[in-house]
Image: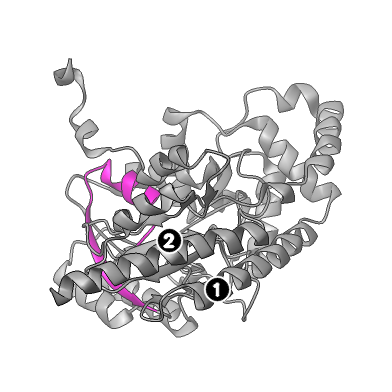
Amino acid sequence: MENKFAERVRLVKSSETREILKVTERPEVISFAGGLPAPELFPVEALKDVCHAVLNEEGPASLQYSTTEGYIPLREGICKRMEVTGINSTIDNVLITSGSQQALDLTGRLFINEGDTIICESPTYLAAINAFKSYDAKFVEVAMDDDGMVMEELEKKLQEHPNTKFIYTIPDFQNPTGRTLKLERRKKMIELANQYDVLIVEDNPYGAVRFAGEALPPVKHFDTESRVIYISTFSKIFTPGLRLGWICADKHFIDKFVSFKQTADLHTDSFAQRITAKYMELYDIEEHINKIKAVYKERCTAMLSCIEEFFPKNITYSKPEGGLFIWIELPEPVDSREIFTECLKNNVAFVPGAPFFPNGTKNNTLRLNYSNMPKDKIFEGMKRLGEVVQHELEKENTLLLK
């Protein structure tokens, strides 16, 4: 029956991170693998009141089919939040999606032809790689440093690949590295996109979760030719289970996105949209986000301290000012997948870095998540992980000396 599948099926594989999460669901495993928000911070009690209010005030409408574009009060609330960050828009520029993952998939469907070139950071978000690969995109990776994508390298790649369809970037607390694109590079990215006539897909799920340093305007803030497609989500600042994201773009693009979304799911969950809008009406979502930031700052600081204390000194790692992740680079030729296998025996887990490189490079890297575990488990888990890393590096050095 294999010959019955569409040709694109060969392009799609299960997410390696999702497969790892299945392994780490055992309660005894201390997992730094998933990009999971802290569940104890979900506003459960407030949402009980919010759900009651929605059902009392607009029960039938909240359970009915809705418009594809999304619930107007929610789109208005999103526009107000984006305006604070430096993006001026109207509801005509906003489409509500079923999580930001649907936004990525719709972007692939709308723009990618077979063999089209996508330029991205190296490494980049695994689920975006999988979404774009399903439309047979070709990836060109651009090197990063501590200040994000290197613009000289980006220009070089644009010159070498004149038919590039778009640049995919996560400028704030990037997944998987936790790095942030500095201000001058954001401006330069727009200049290059204008010069070489390419689109920019700006994926910003983490920007609101800044707990240190100075906030930077989105890349879209500098957009002078309406070529930036901005994607964000409520998953990291509210609840991921409601599956609410959005696309902000020029109305010409939004109209096309709407047409494609209609073929996928008609519209995003009506009840979830009204719950979120009502929460923003009755409660201060910024106060809620500030609670999240305070907890994540504490946990990130704890994890960084553990790296200093328990890990070998000949590694490099990111020091994020927000978001959910720390990125570690080990000496070559250490393979983090082997370390992962050993760590599972010690009931601690992370995500090996190789899958985040779309063209399959750098096995000596790994991603750690600090948002989901309390400080005591961070301390214990990092101690176990540090011991395994230390042992594997010593073993590798012994082999090299033979």
Residue 259: percent from left, percent from top: 43, 36
Q: Amino acid at mark 1?
A: Leu
> To which residue does mark 2 refer?
367
Of the numbered discs 1 and 2, the one sitting upstream in the chain is: 1
Q: Nearer the viewer, residue 10 or 283?
A: 10
Q: Residue furthest top?
A: 1
Residue 348: percent from left, percent from top: 48, 52
> Badges 1 and 2: C-beta atoms under 8 Å apart?
no
Instruction: State how far apart marks 1 and 2 are (Cα).
Output: 13 Å
Looking at the image, residue 89 lies above or below residue 135: below
- For image coordinates 67% across by 35% down, the residue present is 272
- For image coordinates 82% across by 38% down, the residue present is 50
Magenta stretch in the rendered image: 124-145
> To which residue does mark 1 refer?
304
User: Dividing the image into 4 quarters, which one contains the C terminus?
Assistant: bottom left
Magenta-span inclusion, residue 200: no
Looking at the image, residue 28 lies above or below residue 288: above
Pointer 1: residues within 10 angstroms few (<14), some, or many (20+)?
A: some
Residue 283: percent from left, percent from top: 84, 51
Q: For residue 63, which quarter of the picture? A: top right
Is any atom of residue 191 visible in this view?
yes
User: Could you tell whether 210 is left or right of 381 in the image?
Assistant: right
Q: In front of the other: label 1 or label 2?
A: 1
- For image coordinates 44% across by 43% down, the residue present is 257
* Label 2: which secondary element: strand
User: Could you tell whether 167 is left or right of 202 in the image?
Assistant: left
Q: For residue 397, which quarter of the picture? A: bottom left
Q: Amino acid at mark 2?
A: Arg
Pointer 2: residues within 10 angstroms few (<14), some, or many (20+)?
A: many
Q: How many marks?
A: 2
* Label 1: which secondary element: helix
